[in-house]
């Protein structure tokens, strides 16, 4: 989220952050949201005893209440409901730590290990639109890195993770060309 915050502050994206939500009460991203000021909704939403659809409806209500028009999923590790995906269709993006469609559905170090195990010579990150198909939405941006024979899952993650923030910024810039958005 930090590169997006910095891009908004610098005016390099015509957008503002209006809400930061998490399903984890102790998520550091909530503190980052609070630090943006009193006009930014920074909220923990518990998923306890809620169905996926109920939880996603609570998130949508909080986002709409804050005036969000576009959603970026940063470190979000939940599968989203069809109703959420349909409502935010074309207005919600996520990052995946591989060059989709390769290694879709995998998470974190498991994805990087799969790249290493497959002997691939490049990897990277993908910003994609969120759809009901996990990691199956249209690709917006991909950033690439060379995979060295000496790379491990951890070293590959260390090379790719710094590309994710700038990729989000590029995706937001591309989306909001000529319009101001809130997310």
Image (cartoon, rainbow, N blue to C red):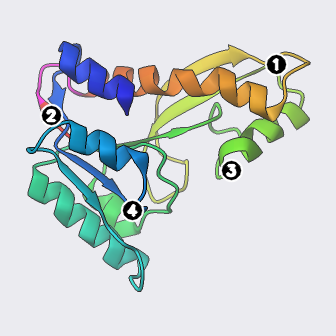
Is residue 90 something one can see in this rendering? Answer: no
Residue, disc 4: 25
Query: Over which residues does the magenta segment extend?
Result: 176-180
| Dots 2, 4 in contact, CB < 8 A | no
Q: Which residue is mark 2?
A: 181
**Badge number at residue 106:** 3
Q: In the image, which is nearer the foreground, mark 4 or mark 1?
A: 4
Splitting the image into 4 quarters, where does residue 118 fall? Answer: top right
Q: What whole-number distance in Å separates the C-alpha atoms at marks 4 and 3?
A: 24 Å
- In the rendered view, does 63 fall on the left or right side of 6? left
Q: In the rendered structure, are the residues bearing label 3 and label 2 in contact, judged by CB atoms less than 8 Å apart?
A: no
User: How many numbered markers are drawn?
Assistant: 4
Which badge, 2 or 4, comes first in the chain's sequence? 4
Alpha-carbon distance for marks 4 and 1?
39 Å
Label 3: state its secondary structure. Answer: loop
Q: CA distance from mark 3 to mark 2?
A: 30 Å
Q: Which secondary structure dominates the residues rendered in magenta? A: loop
In the rendered image, residue 116, in percent from the top left (x then y), is placed at 85, 32
User: Which residue is rendered at x = 17% and y = 14% of the image?
Assistant: 11
Q: What's the CA distance linking mark 3 and mark 1?
A: 19 Å
Q: Mark 1: give few (<14), some (14-19) or many (20+) Cα within 10 Å.
A: few
């Amino acid at each position: 989220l930090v590169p997006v915050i910095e891009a908004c502050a610098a005016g390099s994206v015509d957008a503002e952050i209006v809400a930061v939500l998490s399903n984890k009460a102790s998520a550091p991203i909530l503190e980052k949201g609070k630090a943006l000021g009193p006009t930014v909704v920074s909220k923990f939403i518990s998923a306890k005893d809620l169905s996926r659809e109920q939880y996603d409806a609570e998130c949508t209500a909080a986002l709409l209440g804050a005036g969000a028009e576009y959603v970026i999923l940063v470190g979000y590790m939940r599968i989203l409901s069809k109703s959420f995906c349909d409502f935010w269709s074309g207005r919600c993006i996520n990052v995946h730590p591989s060059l989709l469609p390769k290694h879709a559905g995998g998470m974190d170090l498991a994805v990087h290990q799969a790249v290493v195990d497959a002997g691939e010579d490049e990897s990277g990150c993908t910003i994609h639109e969120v759809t009901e198909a996990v990691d199956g939405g249209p690709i917006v941006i991909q950033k690439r890195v060379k995979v060295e024979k000496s790379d491990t899952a951890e070293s590959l993650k260390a090379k790719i993770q710094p590309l994710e923030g700038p990729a989000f910024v590029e995706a937001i810039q591309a989306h909001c060309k000529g319009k101001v958005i809130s997310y």
